[in-house]
C-alpha cells in the first residue's frame, strides 16, 4: 500500500509536524498527515472544496451498491457542489508519496496515516486534470447543488465514507 500527502503547493521538500485543529486530537502533538491509495480520490479536489466521499468496503451490501453507485465499474464516489466545478477544473494538485515507515494508521475508514516526526517525500506526482484523474481511478463523480442530503443519507449506509471541508458547503435547506 502506498501513502500520499496531497497539496496545491508544488515545491514541498520536507513535511514538519503541524499542530492539529481537530477537537478529537491532542492540540499539542504535531502530526504529518498522509492518505492511503484507496482513499486518495477523496483528496483529488481543491483543498477547501466540500465533498462527500464513499467507497465500497468489506461490509457494503449489494442493496447499498445498487442504490448509491450508478456504475458497476466504480467502487468509489465523490460528490461535490456545482459551485466548485470551475475551481476544480482549474486546480492542479501535487501528490507527495511517503515511505510508510514512520507512519501509523490513524483512521482505517478514512485511510488516514500520521507521523509525529519530520518526513521527506520519496516521490512527487503532478495532477493537472482532476476530473481525468478521478475517472482514471474508476471514481464516479457527482455534482449536486447542495451536499447535505447525501451527507445525511450516506451515513446510514454500509459504505466506508468521509466528509471533507463541510464547513465550506452551501447552507442546509
Image (cartoon, rainbow, N blue to C red):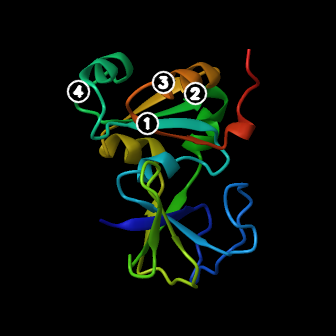
29 relative position to 34: left or right: right
Q: Earlier in the sequence, mark 2 or mark 3?
A: 2
Q: Determine which of the numbered discs, if any, sits on residue 39 in the image.
A: none
User: Which numbered circle lies on residue 156?
Assistant: 3
Which callout, 1 or 3, points to the residue nearer the camera?
3
| Residue labelled with disc 2 | 151
Q: CA distance from mark 2 to mark 3?
A: 10 Å
Distance from Cα at disc 1 to Cα at disc 2: 10 Å
Q: Nearer the viewer, residue 90 or 69?
A: 69
The residue positioned 62% from the left and 73% from the top of the image is 31
Q: At numbered mark 1, what does the secondary structure look like: helix, strand or loop? A: strand
Q: Please give the residue where the numbered disc 1 appears in the rendered image.
A: 54
**Where, by quadrant of the figure, is residue 13 drawn?**
bottom right
Quadrant in which residue 85 is drawn:
top right
Q: Mark 1 near mark 3, Cβ–Cβ under 8 Å?
A: no
Neighbour class for label 3 at 10 Å: few (<14), some, many (≥20)?
few
User: How far is mark 2 from mark 4, CA to CA?
Assistant: 22 Å
Question: Mark 4 and mark 3: span between their CA atoms?
Answer: 21 Å
Label 4 belongs to which residue? 72
Q: Residue at x 72, y 71 (%)?
A: 19
Give how far across and how far down residue 115 sits, in percent.
Answer: 53, 76
Query: SS for tag 3?
Result: loop
Q: Earlier in the sequence, mark 2 or mark 4?
A: 4
Instruction: Give the mark nearer the N terminus: 4 vs 3.
Output: 4
Real-space Cα separation, disc 1 to disc 3, in angstroms: 12 Å
Q: Earlier in the sequence, mark 4 or mark 1?
A: 1
Residue at figure coordinates x 73%, y 38% from the top left: 168
Residues at discs 4 and 1 in contact (Cβ within 8 Å): no
**Within 10 angstroms of label 4, few (less than 14), some, or many (20 or more) residues?**
few
Of tags 2 and 4, the one toward the viewer is: 2
170 sits left or right of 52 in the view: right
The tag earlier along the polypeptide, 1 or 2, is 1
Amino acid at each position: 500500500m502506498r501513502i500520499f500527502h496531497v497539496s496545491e503547493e508544488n515545491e514541498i521538500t520536507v513535511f514538519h509536524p503541524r499542530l492539529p485543529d481537530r477537537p478529537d486530537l491532542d492540540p499539542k502533538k504535531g502530526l504529518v498527515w498522509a492518505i492511503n491509495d484507496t482513499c486518495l480520490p477523496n483528496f483529488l479536489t481543491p483543498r477547501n472544496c466540500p465533498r462527500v466521499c464513499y467507497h465500497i468496503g468489506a461490509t457494503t451490501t449489494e442493496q447499498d451498491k445498487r442504490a448509491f453507485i450508478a456504475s458497476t465499474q466504480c467502487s468509489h464516489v465523490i460528490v461535490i457542489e456545482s459551485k466548485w466545478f470551475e475551481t476544480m477544473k482549474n486546480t492542479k494538485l501535487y501528490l507527495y508519496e511517503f515511505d510508510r515507515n514512520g507512519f501509523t494508521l490513524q483512521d482505517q475508514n478514512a485511510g488516514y496515516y500520521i507521523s509525529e516526526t519530520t518526513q521527506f517525500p520519496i516521490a512527487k506526482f503532478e495532477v493537472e486534470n482532476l476530473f481525468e484523474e478521478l475517472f482514471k481511478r474508476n471514481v464516479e463523480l457527482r455534482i449536486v447543488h447542495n451536499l447535505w442530503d447525501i451527507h445525511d443519507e450516506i451515513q446510514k449506509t454500509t459504505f466506508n465514507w468521509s466528509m471533507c471541508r463541510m464547513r465550506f458547503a452551501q447552507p442546509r435547506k
